[in-house]
Amino acid sequence: MIFWRLWSLIRGYVVIVVEGKQIEKFINMAVSRGYNLWDISQPMENVLTAKVDVSVYPRLRHVARTCRCKMRISRKTGLPFTAAKMRKRKMLFAGAVIFFLALYILSSFIWSVEVTSSRELKTITEQQVLDAAAKYGIKRGALRYAIDNRKAAEALEKEFMEVSWVGIEIRGTKIIIDVVEKILPEEDERSRPGNIVAQKDGVIKEILVLSGEPKAAAGDTVKKGDILISGIIYPELPEEKEGKAEEDTGDEDDKEQPEEPRYVSARGIVRARVWYEAKTRVPLVQHKEELTGQKQQVVVLRIGEEEVTLKNQAKGNKYKHFRTDRDVKRFSLWKYRLPVELITTTYHQIEKVDIYLSMVEARSQAEEVAMKDISSRLPEGAEVVSRRTVITSANEKELKAKVYVETLENIARFVPLK
């Protein structure tokens, strides 16, 4: 069927309009004599439209006269008619040939060079990459078929020691140079003096100090930003010695100078009880759409502006509720796209279903939704200690709830000293 319709486009066909009171007789006589008519439709009473081959049209005149019907051509389609138009318009045809030839020649050159990177370039600039690429033939005006992507990429990798990888891709008349810089190790901020502060509100369960001076203890309630372990260690004040007055020599140079505070990088683990809250509402009547498994497909072959329906299961009677999927396949010859598309439209039947939840099911669903929200906020290693659900309101339409979760987690965060 597909090849036959393509063959009709090549041979040419016409769309005819038949008017008369004996339309059915016209169709029966044409079919009985072996004349092929397709895409037959009746837009109104006593009017018929159909497609027939060019060679068949003259033979249908006798059938139309016999049935006392009027027949005329409304449209001519196919390669013979297009060629006839071109013969009458030789300059237009020559201009089209010159245009496509010029388009082919222009598409053989590179007109744009672009430098991309997954992150901002720091050690080199885009202009440096463009200048280096130009030395290896990657520049505007270069013949695209003369460019060796692999060799040029390897040369650029050797040119820049700061680069770990270079990829070159040709997209039409554009070249894209993808550059990946080496990631240099940055200075570890933990090597600098700093404090351990609370990154959340909570009640301290236990504290382990590895370096620094503790500023909080187990059982203390802390707020976000409070210093838990200080990176500034002050010297202990010396106790006054007994009999200092008798042993005092009076020499001011022998007096001890006050010690300066020491600055260290505070380290430690502070585990605290932290509370989270999430609000949620769940409708007791939920509307859902479910696929029934039934589907209809419409397959259309588009050639330029002409469309040929290869398969039509819908035929204007689509489902009452449906979901549409559209797939377009484009044909190409080597690297050039042809004006030919195969369009497949699928109509999936869906059924709207109402689901009624009980209070127990709604409560369980509310807890599940709230826990997903809270889990997205929990840090790695957090331990859930307890969970409590409070129903704030409930009626025949929805249920509202609050979920409280208590966790045990490390709330320590290092902040360098200014």
Image: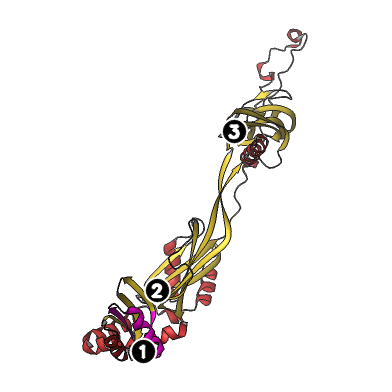
The residues tagged by marks 3 and 2 sit, at their Cα atoms, a distance apart of: 59 Å
Give the tally of numbered discs.
3
What span is in magenta?
Answer: 13-38
In the rendered image, residue 97, in percent from the top left (x then y), is placed at 29, 85
Closer to the N terminus: mark 3 or mark 1? 1
107 lies above or below 378: below
- Give the residue type that dot 3 points to: Leu
The residues tagged by marks 3 and 1 sit, at their Cα atoms, a distance apart of: 69 Å
In the rendered image, residue 363, in percent from the top left (x then y), is placed at 65, 35
392 lies above or below 185: above
- The quarter of the picture where residue 366 lies is top right
Query: Which residue is found at the position 46% from the left and 85% from the top?
Result: 3
- The quarter of the picture where residue 362 lies is top right
Q: Which mark is residue 151?
A: none
Q: Which mark is residue 399?
A: 3
- Give the residue type that dot 1 points to: Arg
In the rendered image, residue 33, in percent from the top left (x then y), is placed at 39, 91
163 lies above or below 21: above
Q: Is residue 104 visible?
A: no
**Image quarter of the C terminus:** top right
Q: Does the stretch in magenta take in 238?
A: no
Q: Going by the picture, which residue comes out furthest to the right? A: 242
Query: Which residue is found at the position 54% from the left and 56% from the top?
Result: 350
Closer to the N terminus: mark 2 or mark 1? 1
Which residue bears the numbered disc 1? 11
User: In screen coordinates, is 281 left or right of 41?
Assistant: right
Q: Nearer the viewer, mark 2 or mark 1?
A: 1
Query: Which residue is found at the position 70% from the left and 30% from the top?
Result: 272
Which residue bears the numbered disc 2? 173
